[in-house]
Image: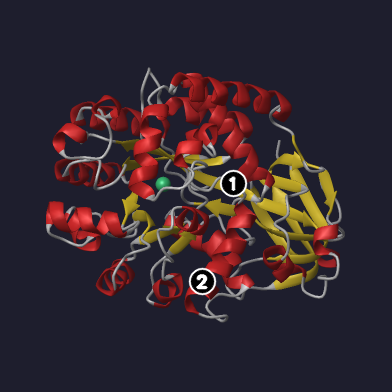
Amino acid sequence: MTKTLLIKNARVLVTMDDERREIADGAVYIRDNVIEQVGRSADLPQQADEIIDAANHVVMPGLVNTHHHMYQSLTRVIPAAQNGELFNWLTNLYPIWANLTPEMVHVSTLAAMSELILSGCTTSSDHLYIYPNGCKLDDSIEAAGKIGMRFYAARGSMSVGQSKGGLPPDRVVEEEGAILKDTQRLIETYNDAGRHAMQRIVVAPCSPFSVSRDLMKEAATMARSFGVSLHTHLAENANDIAYSREKFNMTPAEYAEDCGWVGHDVWHAHCVQLDDDGIYMFGRTGTGIAHCPCSNMRLASGIAPIRKMIDSGVPVGLGVDGCASNDSGHMMGEVRQAMLLQRVGFGPDAMTARQALEMATLGGAKVLNRDDIGALKPGMSADIVMFKLDTIGFAGALHDPVAALVFCTPPNVSYSIINGKVVVRDGALCTIDLPVVIERHNALAHQLALAAR
Ligand SMILES: [Zn+2]
């Protein structure tokens, strides 16, 4: 038995289709997990198993978050890590993260996903690169299944500890053989290569300053043998560049190319300090970038030249980054910051509201190498979010409700449909008991902070 869902009467339906149509009095007709029709309410079927009235709402494709570390929701605003740059910030946090437990990974993933979903995100990646005390990526994957989010579980790793010249303490790094073995197990157990897939595995050594060149290369070989994507951090700030020059005698972009880390199946977080040669090479090879404006501002890493990257053909998506360096996981808030920060760096016409929304939808889909999410059109996955317009935050802005989503106070969704399932109804998550998750999350965060003292 198939199930149909009709969303109708949208004040504006933002399609992100090839013509970037915005349809007044728009509607979407969904069968099971796939969009079947998009158009004006009057032109679509009038009946369905479930009908959602979207009067006074903007309806748009769910946002795609391309970079996160969900466990970090437990370590927001840690006093010792509030005011440092990347390397200082990391060295203050590694000892705290060394006490993570499997329950903490599971609960923090639920918390981070709740915040993302409520703020308009329907697909997220999560880069988990620290596995102490029996933690496994399976703990996050299980959480994603419970809450109903489309998920890219990135099997991160660190293998070069301080004794070998890396940044992390030795006790949080793993053996390279064990990393590759576990990565293969995860791909074989969980990766769904099909269209409308709800879970994919990504091969994701943490960064050039925490893994070896061998691991970077072997990771690329493994990912390609299974047809999965690759993800890491690259060219994040000036110290990151200095490390690359000193250790490898290469720029980060040259190092990535040397290790086989370029192509449509690769995306790098940050790239704030990517040089022009790197930008052109990424554009030529279709290598993607996860832009994380809040984190870049928080750690004073700089302003990523996103306008130039997009103009050079680099696929760019948006990421909130981990909640230890944001410390918000609000996806529409990140869209707003992306627009504002490009203007600070490159002038008032460097990014429009609609371009920022496009980066967070179509851009993210492209970075994740997908053509079934990021737009509302027939044949796409049914990932749809609705924002209510008659709120104080939008008062006086309704002559352009779409731009208002980005310029005004970042809104939460009133509805979110992921893979055809209603996950948020009337502003509340339907799949988990959020107050219970928040209470447990706070208790675990307290426990983690205390353990490090
Ligand atoms: Zn990161």
Q: Nearer the viewer, residue 351 or 314?
A: 351
Residue 55 falls in image quadrant:
bottom right
From what the image shows, is residue 418 above or below residue 39?
above
Structural distance between the alpha carbons of marks 2 and 1: 19 Å
Badge number at residue 342: 2
The C terminus - image quarter: top left
Q: Is residue 347 above or below residue 232?
A: below
On the rendered structure, is 328 left or right of 274?
A: right
Which one is in front, 91 or 334?
91
- Residue 209 quadrant: top left
Q: Position of residue 179 (x, y in %)?
A: 26, 30
The numbered mark at residue 328 is 1
Q: Residue at x 49, y 30 (%)?
A: 140
Q: Earlier in the sequence, mark 2 or mark 1?
A: 1
Q: Nearer the viewer, residue 90 or 108?
A: 90
Mark 1 Cα shell of 10 Å, populated few (<14), some (14-19), many (≥20): many
Element carrying mark 1: loop
Where residue 290 appears, x then y in whole percent?
A: 43, 57
